[in-house]
Image (tube, grey):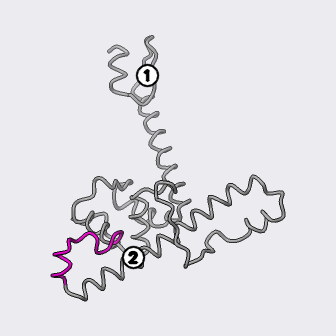
């Protein structure tokens, strides 16, 4: 087996053109280290976003990673309905829908938007506190940093996008599950 064959099977690291052979045990150890690092980064990310407890609750029961693009149509629809409300339906469907169902969908959507707004403000507060720690010697900065990150203004609408805050749809799904806006068994719904 030449080094070219080795490159095709293990593309995660660079092998020089010279003959470099790794034993299967070494390759397995490298792969294990990579997966452990990936898990650690995911756990740190969820801790930072404030949804680690929900991730830990579901991580052993299901796959360790929620992939938004692999949701089935029912899961996708439920998630989009919480995220966008009645906008997921056509005008024809809305006109045929019972008034109580419209009211419930709107109520869940409004609550979801409030929760997302609070969450986004908390993340912004964490980000600005991390930035302001660079200037910690100032008395004014110390007073700003001492304010808890979860102290938010419910009347302020945070318009920063998920992308700018480095929030993925997988994070939003876990967040909605933790708030009860999506069912606890959302990940295994068929």
Distance between the Cα atoms at labels 1 and 2? 49 Å
Residue 54 lies in quadrant: bottom left
Above or below, 151 relative to 165: below
| Residue situated in front as seen by the camera: 51 or 132 | 132
| Range of residues picked out in magenta | 82-97
Residue 173 lies in quadrant: bottom left
Q: Residue at x 35, y 62 (%)?
A: 61
Q: Residue at x 32, y 67 (%)?
A: 79
| Residue situated in front as seen by the camera: 48 or 95 | 95
Q: Position of residue 116 (x, y in %)?
A: 47, 70
**Left or right of 15 in this view: 100:** left
Classified by dominant secondary structure, the portion drawn in magenta counts as: helix
Element marked by disc 1: loop
| Residue situated in front as seen by the camera: 19 or 91 | 91
| Residue situated in front as seen by the camera: 80 or 37 | 80
Nearer the observer: mark 1 or 2; the answer is: 2
**Left or right of 53 in this view: 129:** right
Disc ID at residue 22? 1
Element marked by disc 2: loop
Question: Which residue occupies the extreme bottom position in the image?
Answer: 100
Q: Residue at x 49, y 66 (%)?
A: 53
Report if residue 62 lies within the magenta region. no
Report if residue 86 lies within the magenta region. yes
Disc ID at residue 180? 2
């Amino acid at each position: 087996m030449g080094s070219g064959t080795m490159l095709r099977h293990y593309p995660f690291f660079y092998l020089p053109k010279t003959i470099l052979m790794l034993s299967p045990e070494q390759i397995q150890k490298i792969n294990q280290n990579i997966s452990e690092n990936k898990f650690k980064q995911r756990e740190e990310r969820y801790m930072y976003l404030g949804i680690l407890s929900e991730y830990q609750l579901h991580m052993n029961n299901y796959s360790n990673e929620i992939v938004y693009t692999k949701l089935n149509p029912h899961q996708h629809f439920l998630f989009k309905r919480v995220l966008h409300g009645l906008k997921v339906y056509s005008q024809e469907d809305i006109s045929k829908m019972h008034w109580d169902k419209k009211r419930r969908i709107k109520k869940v959507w409004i609550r979801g938007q409030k929760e997302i707004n609070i969450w986004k403000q908390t993340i912004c507060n964490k980000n600005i506190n991390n930035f302001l720690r660079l200037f910690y010697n100032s008395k004014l900065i110390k007073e700003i940093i001492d304010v808890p990150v979860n102290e938010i203004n419910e009347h302020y609408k945070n318009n920063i996008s998920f992308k700018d805050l480095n929030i993925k749809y997988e994070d939003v799904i876990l967040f909605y599950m933790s708030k009860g806006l999506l069912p606890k068994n959302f990940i295994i719904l068929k």
